[in-house]
Image: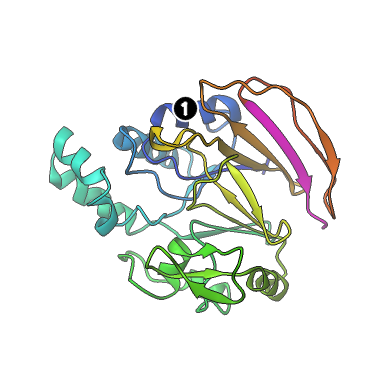
Amino acid sequence: DGGSSICSDIHGQYSDLLRLFEYGGFPPEANYLFLGDYVDRGKQSLETICLLLAYKIKYPENFFLLRGNHECASINRIYGFYDECKRRFNVRLWKVFTDCFNCLPVAALIDDKILCMHGGLSPDLGHLDEIKNLPRPTDVPDTGLLCDLLWSDPGKDVQGWGMNDRGVSYTFGHDKVTEFLLKHDLDLICRAHQVVEDGYEFFADRQLVTIFSAPNYCGEFDNAGAMMSVDETLMCSFQILKPAERKIKFMASNKIGKTLVVYHMELEYILEYRFRFSI
């Protein structure tokens, strides 16, 4: 009730997580769905995951956490979280978090119309109930449905299924997105897993959107971070968090395809883009 805000890929950027809450509202003022990748890369993975888990415990009906590919021992052992746990506390703490990550859900369905996951589609996904039937707790396997939900990517020049440059899972084309939405009577796939310049990026004629919420990722990218809010009517708005050193002030409007008016609000660091699905 009251809509939801969707975020992803915080990657230990704790101060940016707080900025997202400052704009979107601190729980339980707003409902949140996070699409994974809370740890690694950034300097404050522990603060990030502890705050998110605390909110989940405090507000279990308003706050939801999905698993990303970095919520996996073999990945965060390498990309920073293990070292942070060991340096600041001990290896035993890292193992406790591993047990926690192995229990996280991997997908969410909003109003039976918007399917959310960290990675993307899978050739092994024939029916949505197959996601519900995935066993937990579990590690992330090297292949199969669970792996793909956390690792696959859309491919602009791909038809059907293609090889993934990550060396894991697949890429999928526009045709697979359209086919999947029609088969399951869905309007949108909302996923994460890739840095995108504006914090959000559409694919397949606005049938899929990538959300990335860590601005200025790793201090090496000049990307914005985004949060997508979905209200009760499936009106979606993108709140765009620009890197702190940049200020964006402009307004524009347009009408594209089946969407309603698209507009940008004049706010320091924040841009807003709205559209509604045909329901």
* Residue at 55% over, 45% down: 196
Q: Answer above or below: position of 266 versus 151.
A: above
Residue located farthest toward the front when viewing the structure as drawn: 157
> As rendered, which of 203 and 25 lies closer to the eye?
203
Q: Is residue 89 visible?
A: no
Quarter holding the C terminus? bottom right
Q: Residue at x 47, y 27 (%)?
A: 18
Q: Decide if residue 86 is in sight here.
A: yes
Question: Helix, strand or loop at disc 1?
Answer: helix
- The part of the chain drawn in magenta is 270-279
Foreground residue, 80 or 2? 80
Q: Could you tell me what secondary structure mostly forms the magenta stretch?
A: strand
Inspect the magenta stretch and tell me whether residue 8 lies in it: no
- Left or right: 52 in relation to 76: right
Q: Nearer the viewer, residue 38 or 211?
A: 211
* Residue occupied by mark 1: 18
